[in-house]
């Protein structure tokens, strides 16, 4: 129940002081602005601020340069850093130009090294050729082709029937290819190319920069690459030194102009007259005192504080805060939706009931400890938010496992309440039904509290989960239990009239009665034919939902029985096999149950929260509090 109280504040001051106030709002990190147009709709005297941000272009340049230089975009204190925009822009241009020049040199050297490596790769299969490449390429009457062909094509070359004068000289080979030189007269080179193509010959193009023998060329290229790599290391070192030298200045510039840009962005939320600005927003009540300290008296600014109930045109956002442990389960609450400002935060109840549900449904000391350890490890290693919940429900499973006397499905190690023995199965199912009735009552009480806080008579008086629904449900539950378990008979004409007929009638007439209480017009202007038909079906659904919800809670006990049954199957199979087979079945059986049934039980616990519990009192329609920071 931890929705923090908020206040709406309105800041009014001279327009020339707006930037100072914007800095105060940003620094406080507790102010969520509201677009003033929402609160001043129709006002002809208020005008919007200009929205062109003078810092955005420079900030984009700084960000681009930092990304290019690999400088992390961190934010630092900027009290001692105050160059103007033109000076900073000139610094950025100089650094960018120097970095660009250096980067171009680095890329050119990297490209040359890559080209040399590619040439070495091409020449490697030809290193047995002891002829200078210039001499081969200078022959007038013979055409030369370097390349490779599949081994099968080479083996079939002697059987190849062609009128073309073609000679293939092998130089190297592996399991798949044969590398070599194809020689043919210049007059037949096009015909020879067609023949080679039919033999799946892949040509290797040798760069014009190579003149010696393949082996000598390879050595020259390797030696050149060593020199280029030394040159590359030097250029990279220069880039690192340049980046390191300018990093502090760039980080400070980024921090400053991001701050100024965000301050300027606050103008889109404000309105102004010729002389004054108006800025409104939400702030936590606890942060209001600290915020006032940021608003210096020198700024000549008026601070108006209003209660959320006094604000008609804007719904307060929601900021929830829970203690450690309970906070883990906020993710479940947020999955359904944040509570509204005047709504109770159910996170504490979710943490309590979800943990209890899981423990009862998956009670085993050994498996619970495994889950708890897995959750702790996942949080330490992966920082998964769900891991902390797994650790908590694992501990709950271990505690309930002690009560059940179950250790990895074995119920002979420690004594306990064995789910499958005697009448224990019926006992746990009845306990689950009773637990469900209790939680339905808790949900109704929470709904009544929410209705009172929201000043909604229909919600806390005439709804199925209001006072009328509470009287109907628990009046009949009490009478039924006393009838079954004792000799007391509560059912009588007056009792039925008070606990059944009257509550259902009030629920049926809830809408017009609410309008009467709120003094609204049209309380009896309904189309009564449609109203009666629709609300009769709703009443039937109300009575059916009470029964179905109680039955749904029985699944808490049913899954406890199911878990015990699955482990009984695992232990029985292990005893039948014996020896190494027994150990294997126990290990893999427990892993299977932990993974599969643990997942199913976790989902079923969440389903009980959302459909049986939340649906009775919780809307989850709140909007998150997002301070300007």
Image (cartoon, helix red, strand yellow):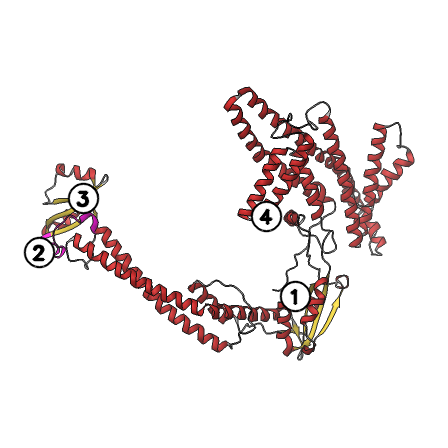
Q: Is residue 532 above or below residue 560?
A: below
Percent position of residue 230, x then y? 29, 61
Say which residue label 1 marks.
33
Q: Residue at x 82, y 46 (%)?
A: 462
Say which residue label 3 marks.
172
User: N-terminal of the two: label 3 or label 4?
Assistant: 3
Horizontal arrangement in the rendering, residue 186 relative to residue 509 (left or right): left
Horizontal arrangement in the rendering, residue 406 relative to residue 475 (left or right): left
Q: Is residue 331 above or below residue 270?
A: above
Percent position of residue 405, x then y? 67, 29
Is residue 206 visible in this depiction of the protein? no
Residue 246 in which image quadrant:
bottom left
Say which residue label 4 marks.
385
Percent position of residue 68, x then y? 42, 64
Q: Residue at x 26, y 58 (%)?
A: 226
Q: Is residue 121 above or below residue 556?
A: below
Label 2 packing within 10 angstroms: few (<14), some (14-19), many (20+): few
Label 2 with label 1: CB-CB less than 8 Å: no
User: N-terminal of the two: label 1 or label 3?
Assistant: 1
Q: Nearer the viewer, residue 203 or 381?
A: 381
Q: Is residue 18 above or below residue 467?
A: below
Percent position of residue 433, x then y? 74, 33
User: N-terminal of the two: label 4 or label 2?
Assistant: 2
Q: Quadrant of the C terminus?
A: bottom right
Q: CA distance from mark 4 to mark 1?
A: 30 Å
Label 1 packing within 10 angstroms: few (<14), some (14-19), many (20+): many
Q: CA distance from mark 2 to mark 3?
A: 26 Å
Q: Residue at x 81, y 38 (%)?
A: 473
Q: Which span is picked out in magenta? A: 123-142
Say which residue label 2 marks.
140
Q: Is residue 291 magenta?
A: no
């Amino acid at each position: 129940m931890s929705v923090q109280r908020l206040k709406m504040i309105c800041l009014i001051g001279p327009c020339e002081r707006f930037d100072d106030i914007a800095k105060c709002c940003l620094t406080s990190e507790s102010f969520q602005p509201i677009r003033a147009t929402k609160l001043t709709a129709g006002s002809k005297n208020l005008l919007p601020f200009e929205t062109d941000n003078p810092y955005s272009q420079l900030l984009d340049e700084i960000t681009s340069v930092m990304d290019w230089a690999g400088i992390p975009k961190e934010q630092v204190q900027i009290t001692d850093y105050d160059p103007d925009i033109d000076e900073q822009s000139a610094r950025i241009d100089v650094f960018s130009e120097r970095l660009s020049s250096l980067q171009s040199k680095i890329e050119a050297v990297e490209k040359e090294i890559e080209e040399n490596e590619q040439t070495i790769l091409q020449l490697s299969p030809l290193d047995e050729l002891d002829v200078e490449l210039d001499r081969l390429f200078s022959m007038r009457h013979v055409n030369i082709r370097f390349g490779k062909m599949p081994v099968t094509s080479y083996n079939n070359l002697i059987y190849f029937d062609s009128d073309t004068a073609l000679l293939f000289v092998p130089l190297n080979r592996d399991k798949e290819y044969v590398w070599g030189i194809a020689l043919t007269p210049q007059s037949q080179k096009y015909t020879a190319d067609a023949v080679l193509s039919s033999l799946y010959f892949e040509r290797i193009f040798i760069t014009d920069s190579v003149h010696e023998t393949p082996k000598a060329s390879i050595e020259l290229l390797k030696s050149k690459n060593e020199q280029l790599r030394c040159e590359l290391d030097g250029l990279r070192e220069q880039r690192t030194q340049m980046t390191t030298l300018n990093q502090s200045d760039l980080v400070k510039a980024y921090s400053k102009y991001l701050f100024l840009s965000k301050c300027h962005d606050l103008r889109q939320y404000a309105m102004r007259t010729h002389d004054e600005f108006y800025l409104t927003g939400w702030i936590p009540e606890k942060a209001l005192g600290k915020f006032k300290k940021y608003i210096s008296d020198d700024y000549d600014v008026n601070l108006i504080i209003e209660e959320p109930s006094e604000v008609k045109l804007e719904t307060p956002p929601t900021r929830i805060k829970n203690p450690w442990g309970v906070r883990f389960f906020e993710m479940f609450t947020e999955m359904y939706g944040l509570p509204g400002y005047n709504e109770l935060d159910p996170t504490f109840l979710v943490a309590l009931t979800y943990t209890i549900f899981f423990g009862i449904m998956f009670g085993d000391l050994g498996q619970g400890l495994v889950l708890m350890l897995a959750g702790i490890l996942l949080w330490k290693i992966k920082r998964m938010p769900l891991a902390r919940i797994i650790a908590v429900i694992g501990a709950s499973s271990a505690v309930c496992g002690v009560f059940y006397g179950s250790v990895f499905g074995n119920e002979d190690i420690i004594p306990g309440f064995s789910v499958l023995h005697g009448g224990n199965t019926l006992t746990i199912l009845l306990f689950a039904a009773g637990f469900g009735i209790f939680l339905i009552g808790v949900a109704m009480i929470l709904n009544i509290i929410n209705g009172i806080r929201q000043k909604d008579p229909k919600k806390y008086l005439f709804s199925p989960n209001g006072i009328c629904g509470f009287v109907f449900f628990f009046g009949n539950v009490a009478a039924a239990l006393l009838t079954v378990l004792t000799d007391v008979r509560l059912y009588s004409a007056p009792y039925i009239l008070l606990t059944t007929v009257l509550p259902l009638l009030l629920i049926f007439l809830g809408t017009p009665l609410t309008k009467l209480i709120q003094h609204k017009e049209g309380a009896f202007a309904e189309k009564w034919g449609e109203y009666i038909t629709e609300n009769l079906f709703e009443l039937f659904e109300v009575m059916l939902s009470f029964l179905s919800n109680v039955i749904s809670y029985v699944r808490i006990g049913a899954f406890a029985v199911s878990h015990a049954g699955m482990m009984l199957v695992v232990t029985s199979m292990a005893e039948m096999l014996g020896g190494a087979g027994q150990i294997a079945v126990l290990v893999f059986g427990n892993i299977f149950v932990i993974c599969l049934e643990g997942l199913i039980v976790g989902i079923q616990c969440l389903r009980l929260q959302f459909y049986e519990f939340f649906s009775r009192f919780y809307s989850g329609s709140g909007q998150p509090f997002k301070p300007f920071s």
